[in-house]
Image (cartoon, rainbow, N blue to C red):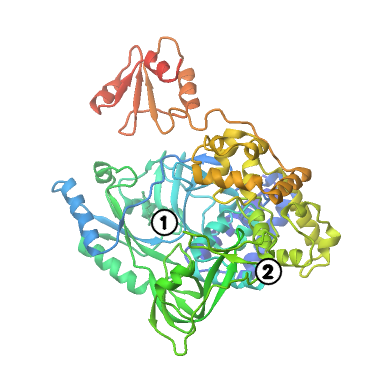
Amino acid sequence: MTNAAREVERLRAELRRHEHLYYVADSPEISDAEYDALMRRLMELEKEHPELASPDSPTGRVGGKAREGFVKVRHSSPMLSLDNALNEAELRDFDRRVRELLRGESYRYMAELKMDGLSTAMRYRNGRFVQAVTRGDGEIGEDVTENARTIRSLPLRVEADEGLRDGFEARGETVMNRRAFERLNAERDANGQARFANPRNAAAGSLRVLEPRVTASRRLDFHPYFLLVEGEPALGSQSEALETLERLGFKVSRQRRLCGGVEEVLEFCARWEAERDTLPYEIDGVVVKVDAVAQQRALGFTAKAPRWAIAYKYPARQAKTRVVGIEVQVGRTGTLTPVAVLEPKEVGGVTVSRATLHNEDEIGRLGLEIGDEVVIERSGDVIPKVVRVSVQGSPRKPFRMPARCPVCGGTVVREEGESASRCINTNCSARLKQSILHFASRGVMNIDGLGEALVEQLVDKGLITNVADLYSLTVEQLENLDRMGAKSAAKLVENIGKSKRNPLPRVLAALGIRFVGERTANFLGDSFGELDAIAGATVEELQEAEEVGPKVAESIYRFFREPRNQSLVEGLRQAGLVFSQEIKRSIVGPFHGLTFVLTGSLPNLSREEAKRRIEEAGGKVAGSVSKKTHYVVAGEDAGSKLAKAKQLKIAIMNEEQLLALLGD
Ligand code: IVH
């Protein structure tokens, strides 16, 4: 080893130790400045000696190159959700079911805090962090490895025990603590960007950005709650799993308790409900799990959740405050949404100053007038809302939906049978601003750097009259705007240019057609393949796409009949956006969601061929038979796997039957 290599190794080990002391154990031994100095030295060395680079180096924490999108990854086993218990009686019901199903065996519960973030799977191989996958739909998530690497409390290297050495997965919650959340929102206010409604949205928005540097700046934390090997619990009990994760260097929540029975669980729940505001991060309840994995297996799963665990949910937190005004916001489709402006009030550690009122009917239902004292509520994942009027104000002033749009002065109408009032001026600048923000947003065209303050200026100065104009903006036009310089202007023009490469479904979603979000856009792209085919389709034809019903089809049809929208589409075509894609023949194969096991030798297909054919049809092929197996395909000389399948009463088929299912 060269001297440089030795120094690099030493620095990395030292930095890892200090990271753990600081971010996990919460007991730093050196100052931030000393830490920074070590990090700088390591960066220098890695720059001088690129051959020494390594993905698990602490320098990776600062966030490397941006990416264009996220790759989809299948989970090693589904990431399910939990059933909820909303009160003590429901928790006792859960306990009774467990007791009955375990028929007299004694059992214990692990009680853990239910943190409010997003569940993520962190994969390790040979003691190194190799991949992070978001929950997604539970079966398939998104690869966010580069972003997760910047989470300081996530160990990039661990001294794996026997049994974990080849590979393991730590599943847990990625969260943003309250301090980081408040700081982020203050920053966003200052930059004229939209606030995040709660720490959970902020954590999700920070992990799913294309720019790892942004994640790095957001100070996320990862708290694991499962330890898996090949998708199955790695140890005999949940308590051992958590202890092991702790020993490996993960930040496992200390607030947990192994309970002898439901009474102890209830005590734990009550204690943390009373003390939840003292925690640095948001919790929305307690997760209760049967501790022994053998008993978990015996209890099994319902269609969507385990029978051996439950989420005891705390009620949403409420507080009282006064409504000092009601503002009206104009959305991208012209919808007018009344928003209550509140005397700022802390609700469960987060300061709330606005709450949505949805529409006129909702205000009527609440009997709300300006000046009233109201009860507001914040539950983990939603925007704060007004629950009821607690004391009528004096004076108080009724709210009336304006007859003219507060932004453009255009006519406001409320159609028969609809609860929403709408500004019908398609040239309304509020609508245009919102359309541009939608167009540029995450998950749509992903144009970084195009925030609210900038869009305001672009529209107000007449630089943009429809979204297609974005593509002809020049550095010269941009650099003279407020809070812009030559450099950020050039960067923005570059980002806008890059967005031209977004695939067709993104472009479709970006158009802002009512009811057409990311999901529907994907289905439309899959069945039509061309924007022009969608634009030209009849209402009936549109309904041939998956999940497109009459209402959605009608909305798409009408959109493309408007001259204004037609010229927008032409503008985007001129700009060179992607208007076509290959049509996927089968999106999900006939075997989607099914697990097969192959045993014995098949008359015609080799093992590899059979496996490939099953996988092409969307199925999975597993090595051994378990309760999760759907079919065993048996050939000549099938041995113990066949016996096991019979014992577990799993469907058995031969090659001929398999080929028939495959449509041969
Ligand atoms: S166990 C199948 N443990 O709550 C088991 N979940 O509704 C599911 N969560 O999606 C997860 N803290 O995002 C578990 N200590 C904890 C948790 C926890 C937070 C979240 C997780 C999950 C949701 C369950």
Report the amino acid beneath label 2. Cys
The vertical placement of 29 against 541, above or below, is below
Q: Secondary structure at mark 1?
A: helix
Q: Indicate the secondary structure of the residue bearing disc 2.
A: loop
Q: Quadrant of residue 525?
A: top right
Label ID, residue 303 = none
Q: Which residue is most to the front?
A: 416
Q: Is residue 226 left or right of residue 551?
A: left
Q: Mark 2 = which residue? A: 408
> Which mark is drawn over residue 246?
1
Q: Is residue 373 visible?
A: yes
Residue 3 visible (yes or no): no
Judged from this view, the residue extending furthest toward the left is 104
Q: Residues within 10 Å of mark 2 (few under 14, many from 20)?
A: some
* Mark 2–mark 1 distance (CA, rounded to whole Å): 58 Å
Q: Residue at x 82, y 64 (%)?
A: 479
Report the residue at 17% width, 51% height from top.
99
Percent from the top left, x then y, of residue 366?
A: 40, 74
In front here: 320 or 5?
A: 320
